[in-house]
Image: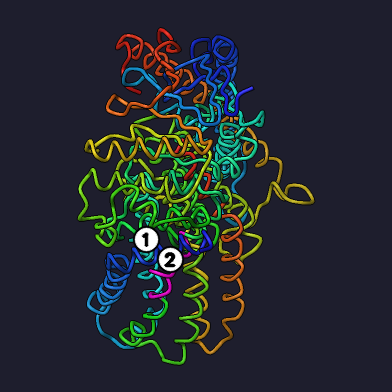
């Protein structure tokens, strides 16, 4: 089997077999969104107004959950050394792990988003744009997050540290993700925001694995 | 000229100089037995040999080519066994070995299972394996895919005498086929005509 | 090898530091005194903004320093990663808290200025948000740098972070040009020369000089302290014989 696919298949299999990553991410996503109608009051117009932003913020925080363990378990059981010693560039290994992380967390988040949109009274004709924005934005989150996940290997209190490191870098994705949804809700074309999300995904694809590989390498030296 | 050589190697961990001026040479079919007290740098040296990190000074060469100049080729020719057991609790013994073998382009997983007596355990998830069984799963990937160089850091840890014998046989087969091995071991694993390398000789009175 | 030798014999750097430090101190104090006098007393109030324009003489140089320090941090990190020069590690580590302080000062004075001018302490426009992100990047750098038991690990990890975070610097600089913001665009560092009267320009430049000299001054003190700390660690290791790494 192709080594790249072998890594993707193993990590996805681990995520589903342990059951925690995908389920916990989705459960957190739902609970975080449900808190908002209870917190700001169930006024339908208010919910519809903030719905896109709430779903995005919750998705962003949920995608952080499994990120800490992206390299951590491999680092602890010695597998990360073997992955770094695989006969392929470390960037490709990182990319395979990021893809598996996205398949296990980002993709389910995007698919589940319309259900939460209903809870937030978001107009259903905005759902396609919401899902499209999440599909374009969450890979960027996984790619940027991988850099942070590599940097915290072996650090004290890695989870909190990871949030401090990557959440500021997630802000551009949040801004343009929400703006795409708002545009669509106002009946305007979300094309510009979606294109920027796509451009950020491509930039993250070009630079993220490289930086994450550097982060992992310094952790192994 | 030997196959795998190191010259004037200096290793620094943190801000401490572990060893300096170290040299080694390894031939096809040869075995290098690293000796020395705790903290003398056996693990550090094996990691340098694997290319996980660069020596602060000196060169490690394979056929006169610095391993740092062509990491992927070097990776493809070596097997590394470190302190971690690299066994995923959610994957069966066979899946664990198959993954590491796929990563190197495939190999004989079933043969490796039987070489380390893991046949009956093949379908058992890693979380139910004992420390010694996990170590055997970790070692079995050596037998699954061929590699010219084995770097083994305390490979006999947690193994019972039967498994130590299997490991010795695996190393003997590997060497008979022209493979080289460098290993550290605190007894229990006697390798015939292994060249000893005592790292305490290269330790400095703390730099 | 390099790292140890350098710690064992940092004499060259220390000689330079001792020579430069009094100059930096003197320039910082003199320029600050002159700049504050000109800015607070001698310069005229703005025809639109009145007396509150005087916040500019702290706010603008602090904002410049916020970007300058992050750029210095990124350059030092790159040098540390590529050439593994230990002085670069120390310089980066010493720069971060100073840069964070300047960034905080810029946000604080900006907020104080915004209340009378815009009628609000804070707006979520591109400039303010990106400077806030800059502050978070500084804090992340400091946290990551100190999160490892082995200081060398912390230095390397945070150096990678500093380089990744550098993408934010052009965003901060050009945010006022790329987006419509409440924040006014650059009036000094712009094509076609500064759009500012010289009675205001002089104290602004003096304050910028004072901040820069202050940065050098504090940086030298911090690096010397780091070198001393390194020597103490080395001495402890020697004393403890073959302590574990």
Which type of secondary structure does the marked residue at label 1 adopt?
Answer: helix
- Name the front one of labels 1 and 2: 2
Which type of secondary structure does the marked residue at label 2 adopt?
Answer: helix
Examine the rendered structure and indicate whether residue A1 appears above or below residue A29. Answer: above
Residue B105 horizontal/vertical position (percent):
53, 56
Residue in the image at 42% along x and 14% along y: C231
Examine the rendered structure and indicate whether residue A68 appears above or below residue C87. Answer: below
Q: Could you tell me which chain the residue with mark 2 belongs to?
A: A
Residue B134 horizontal/vertical position (percent):
27, 47
Q: Could you tell me which chain the residue with mark 1 belongs to?
A: A
Residue A100 on the magenta span: yes
Q: Which residue is mark 1?
A: A64
Examine the rendered structure and indicate whether residue C55 appears above or below residue A16. Answer: above
> Do callouts 1 and 2 mark residues in contact (Cβ within 8 Å)?
no
Q: Residues within 10 Å of mark 2 (few under 14, many from 20)?
A: some
Q: Which residue is mark 2?
A: A9
Q: On the rendered structure, is C150 left or right of C201?
A: left
Q: Main secondary structure of the magenta part?
A: helix
Residue at the extreme right: C192
Determine if residue A85 is in view: yes
Which quadrant holds the C terminus of chain C? Answer: top left
Residue C120 on the magenta span: no
- Point out the stretch of residues depicted in magenta: A97-109
The circle drawn on residue A96 is none
Residue in the image at 41% along x and 90% along y: A123
State the CA–CA distance, disc 1 to disc 2. Answer: 21 Å
Q: Quadrant of residue C225?
A: top left
Q: Quadrant of residue C126?
A: bottom right
**C135 or C164, nearer to the observer:** C164
């Amino acid at each position: 089997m192709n080594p790249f696919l072998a890594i993707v298949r193993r990590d996805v299999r681990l995520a589903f077999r342990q059951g925690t990553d995908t389920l916990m991410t989705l459960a957190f996503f739902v609970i975080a969104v449900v808190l908002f109608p209870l917190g700001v009051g169930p006024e339908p117009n208010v919910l519809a107004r903030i719905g896109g932003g709430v779903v995005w913020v919750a998705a962003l925080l949920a995608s952080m959950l499994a990120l800490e363990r992206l390299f951590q378990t491999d680092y602890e059981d010695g597998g990360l050394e073997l992955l770094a010693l695989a006969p392929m560039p470390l960037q490709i290994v990182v990319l395979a792990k990021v893809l598996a992380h996205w398949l296990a967390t980002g993709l389910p988040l995007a698919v589940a988003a319309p259900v939460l949109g209903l809870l937030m009274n978001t107009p259903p004709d905005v759902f396609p744009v919401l899902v499209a924005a999440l599909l374009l934005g969450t890979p960027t989150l996984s790619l940027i997050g991988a850099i942070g996940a590599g940097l915290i290997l072996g650090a004290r209190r890695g989870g909190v540290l990871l949030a401090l490191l990557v959440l500021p870098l997630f802000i551009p994705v949040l801004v343009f993700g929400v703006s795409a949804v708002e545009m669509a809700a106002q009946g305007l074309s979300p094309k510009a925001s979606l294109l920027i999300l796509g451009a950020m995904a491509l930039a993250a694809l070009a630079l993220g694995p490289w930086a994450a590989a550097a982060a992992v390498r310094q952790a192994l030296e | 000229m030997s196959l795998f050589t190191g010259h004037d190697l200096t290793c620094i961990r943190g801000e401490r100089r572990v060893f300096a001026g170290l040299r080694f040479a390894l031939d096809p079919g040869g075995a290098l037995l690293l000796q020395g007290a705790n903290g003398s740098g056996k693990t550090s040296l094996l990691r340098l040999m694997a290319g996980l990190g660069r020596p602060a000074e000196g060169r490690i060469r394979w056929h006169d080519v610095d391993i740092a100049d062509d990491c992927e080729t070097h990776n493809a020719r070596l097997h590394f066994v470190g302190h971690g057991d690299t066994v995923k609790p959610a994957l069966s013994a066979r899946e664990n070995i198959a993954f590491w073998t796929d990563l190197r382009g495939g190999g004989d997983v079933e043969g490796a299972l039987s070489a380390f007596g893991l046949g009956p355990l093949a379908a058992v998830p890693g979380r139910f394996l004992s420390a010694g069984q996990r170590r055997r799963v970790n070692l079995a990937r050596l037998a699954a895919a061929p590699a010219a160089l084995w770097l083994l850091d305390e490979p006999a840890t947690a193994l019972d005498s039967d498994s130590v014998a299997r490991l010795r046989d695996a190393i003997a087969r590997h060497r008979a086929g022209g493979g080289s091995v460098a290993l550290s071991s605190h007894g229990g694993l006697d390798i015939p005509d292994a060249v000893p390398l005592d790292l305490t000789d290269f330790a400095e009175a703390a730099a | 090898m390099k790292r140890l030798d350098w710690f064992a014999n940092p004499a060259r750097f220390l000689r330079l530091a001792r020579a430069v430090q009094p100059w930096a101190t003197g320039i910082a104090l003199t320029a600050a005194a002159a700049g504050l006098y000109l800015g607070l007393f001698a310069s005229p109030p703005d025809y639109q903004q009145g007396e509150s324009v005087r916040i500019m003489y702290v706010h603008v140089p602090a904002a410049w320093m916020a970007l300058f320090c992050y750029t210095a941090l990124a350059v030092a990190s790159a040098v540390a990663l590529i050439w593994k020069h230990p002085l670069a590690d120390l310089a980066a580590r010493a720069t971060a808290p100073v840069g964070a302080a300047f960034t905080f000062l810029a946000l604080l004075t900006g907020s104080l200025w915004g209340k009378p001018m815009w009628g609000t302490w804070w707006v979520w426009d591109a400039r303010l948000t990106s400077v806030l992100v800059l502050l978070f990047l500084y804090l992340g750098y400091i946290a990551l740098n100190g999160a490892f038991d082995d200081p060398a690990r912390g230095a390397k990890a945070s150096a990678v972070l500093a380089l990744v975070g550098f993408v934010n610097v052009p965003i901060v600089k050009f945010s006022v040009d790329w987006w419509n913001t409440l924040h006014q665009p650059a009036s000094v560092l712009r094509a076609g020369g500064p759009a500012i009267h010289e009675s205001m320009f002089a104290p602004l430049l003096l304050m910028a000089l004072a901040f820069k000299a202050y940065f050098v001054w504090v940086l030298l003190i911090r690096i010397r302290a780091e070198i001393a700390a390194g020597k103490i660690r080395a001495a402890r290791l020697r004393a403890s014989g073959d302590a574990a790494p």
